[in-house]
Amino acid sequence: MQQLPKKVLAICGSTRQQSVNHRFIKAIAAMGNAYFKVLLFDGLATLPHFNPDENKEQVAVSVARFRQLLKEADGVLICTPEYAHGVPGTLKNAIDWTVSTNEFSGKPTMLVTAATDGSFAHKALLETLRVIEAKDIEQHQLLIQFAATKIDSENNITDEPLKAGLQQLVVDFKNTFE
């Protein structure tokens, strides 16, 4: 019996549809298509602002959908820019909606920060993902600095060392499912 490919939910920290981060998600999905199927979560901007008072049994439909997609996924790919040396607010907001419900706990998660610098957001997100118990986050993370110069408009990685590093990251990520 053939095993179905694993489902990976991709979350882009940029809400711009043609962002560098969306292109990196597409490149990673292509690299990993023999191992997993990537579904892009397209509702980041629709999530309401996190409010602990609203985090009850009945949450907004968009929050419930996000949580359900995370539960159904075998793994998570986060690809994000850095805004003003920080994590994009919409991405942090989405993660905050999962803190009390543990969708990330024990879930294989890959973090790719693709930005001009990115080091500040990358470090902050690593810490957040550790706290919410994302599985093996230390082994499945990559900071891509000057990212816009390393991928073309057709989602091809143009930097050979980066391409090799991403391919290895994809293989390592796939191995967490075995």
Image: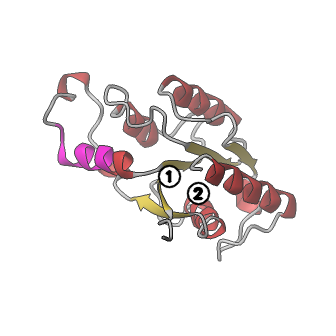
Give the main secondary structure, helix, strand or loop, of the magenta stretch. helix
- SS at mark 1 in the image: loop
Vertical comparison of 30 with 118: above or below = below
- SS at mark 2 in the image: helix
Q: Is residue 103 left or right of residue 147?
A: left
Q: Three-letter amino acid code at disc 2?
A: Asn
Q: Check disc 1 and report the residue beneath it.
A: 14
Q: Is residue 16 magenta?
A: no
Crowding near the residue tagged with mark 2, few <14, some 14–19, many ≥20 C-alpha atoms within 10 Å: many
Q: Quadrant of residue 160?
A: bottom right
Q: Residue 65's spot in the image, x, y percent?
A: 26, 50
Which of pointers 2 and 1 lies earlier in the amino acid sequence? 1
**In this view, which residue lies farthest toward the bottom?**
154
Q: Residue 145's spot in the image, x, y percent?
A: 75, 47
Q: Residue 49's spot in the image, x, y percent?
A: 29, 35
Q: CA distance from mark 2 to mark 1?
A: 7 Å
Q: Check disc 2 and report the residue beneath it.
A: 21
Vertical comparison of 8 with 30: above or below = above
- Looking at the rendering, the stretch of residues picked out in magenta corresponds to 59-68
The answer to whether mark 2 and mark 1 are in CB contact below 8 A is yes
Q: Three-letter amino acid code at disc 1?
A: Ser
Give the colour scheme of this rendering. secondary structure
Q: Residue at x 49, y 34 (%)?
A: 106
